Structure formats: structure tokens, C-alpha cells
């Protein structure tokens, strides 16, 4: 399981680092944000930074505290539960509310879409399994 946690950590840091590129090049996000009122622009940018920061922080936690994330402690349950909820929520939101029909049709972006969605599913599975295992270990 530790290998999966490390891969997940690297992947989460990758998503944080690639996030500005995706917003700018794939979604033309800043053009759309520019159409909002100034306060709404700042709110949208702030939430974007929160997402980027959480992805980076979750990745860093996974790389630094790999063993601790699966040791069945109360903190392991809380952290893996939080991260699992985050990624499961991301998947539900993405597939239910954000149809991907506006992604540019360039091959790089199509491959990127598949790769990123695969990462999101991987994160959700790894942390849900970790949370479940930690919870079961804690209960017994």
C-alpha cells in the first residue's frame, strides 16, 4: 500500500503543478474570469488557489507521512477520510456538473483529459481503501 500512497502523493503534487496550465491553456479560465465583477474574480481565483494548495498539501502529506497514513490511528482515519471525501467529491462534481465537451480537440488535451481523470479515480480509490482499512483496524 505504501507504494500506492507514494504514487498518489507524486500524482497529487503533479496535479497542483499542472493546474495553472490547465486553467490557462485548456479552459481559457482567465478570459472567463475577466467577465466577472472584481469581487467575484477574486473569489474564483481564491478557490482556484485553495484547490491547487490542497492538491499539493495532500501530496506532500502522502510523501512525508506515508507509513502514518495507513497505521490505523485516529489521525490516519481523519486524514484519509478527508482526502478520500475530497477526491470522491471531485469525481462526482466533475462528471455530474462539469461536462468536458469544451476541451480543445487537440490530441495532447484528449490524452491529458484521460490521464487526469485516471489520476482522480486513482486518488479516490487509494484514499477510500486507506480510510476503510484504517477504520476497520481502529474498530477491531
Image: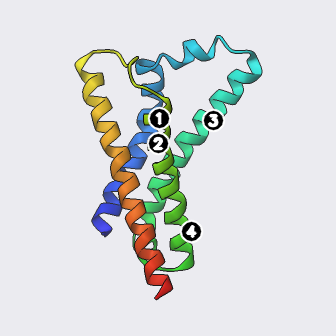
- Please name which of the two marks, 2 or 4, marks the residue nearer to the observer: 2
Q: CA distance from mark 2 to mark 3?
A: 18 Å
Quarter of the image for residue 44 reads top right
> Which mark sits nearer the N-terminus, 3 or 1?
3
Q: CA distance from mark 1 to mark 2?
A: 6 Å
Label 1 crowd (10 A; few <14 / some 14-19 / many >=20):
few
Name the residue located 65 percent from the left edge and 10 percent from the top edge.
35
Q: Position of residue 106 (x, y in %)?
A: 27, 16
> Which mark sits nearer the N-terminus, 2 or 4?
4
> Which mark sits nearer the N-terminus, 1 or 4?
4
Which residue has dot 2 on it? 92
> Which mark sits nearer the N-terminus, 2 or 3?
3
Which residue has dot 1 on it? 96
Quarter of the image for residue 69 reads bottom left
Can residue 37 be seen here? The reply is: yes
Tell me: residue 11, above or below residue 114.
below
Left-right relation of 115 to 135: left
Amino acid at each position: 500500500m505504501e507504494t500506492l500512497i507514494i504514487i498518489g502523493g507524486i500524482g497529487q503534487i503533479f496535479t497542483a503543478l499542472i493546474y495553472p496550465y490547465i486553467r490557462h491553456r485548456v479552459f481559457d479560465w482567465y478570459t472567463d474570469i475577466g467577465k466577472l465583477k472584481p469581487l467575484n474574480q477574486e473569489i474564483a481565483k481564491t478557490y482556484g488557489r485553495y484547490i491547487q494548495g490542497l492538491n499539493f498539501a495532500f501530496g506532500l502529506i502522502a510523501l512525508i507521512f506515508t507509513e502514518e497514513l495507513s497505521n490505523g490511528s485516529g489521525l490516519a482515519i481523519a486524514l484519509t477520510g478527508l482526502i478520500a471525501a475530497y477526491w470522491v467529491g471531485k469525481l462526482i462534481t466533475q462528471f455530474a456538473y462539469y461536462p468536458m465537451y469544451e476541451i480543445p480537440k487537440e490530441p495532447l488535451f484528449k490524452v491529458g483529459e484521460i490521464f487526469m481523470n485516471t489520476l482522480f479515480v486513482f486518488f479516490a480509490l487509494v484514499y477510500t481503501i486507506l480510510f476503510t482499512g484504517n477504520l476497520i483496524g481502529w474498530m477491531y
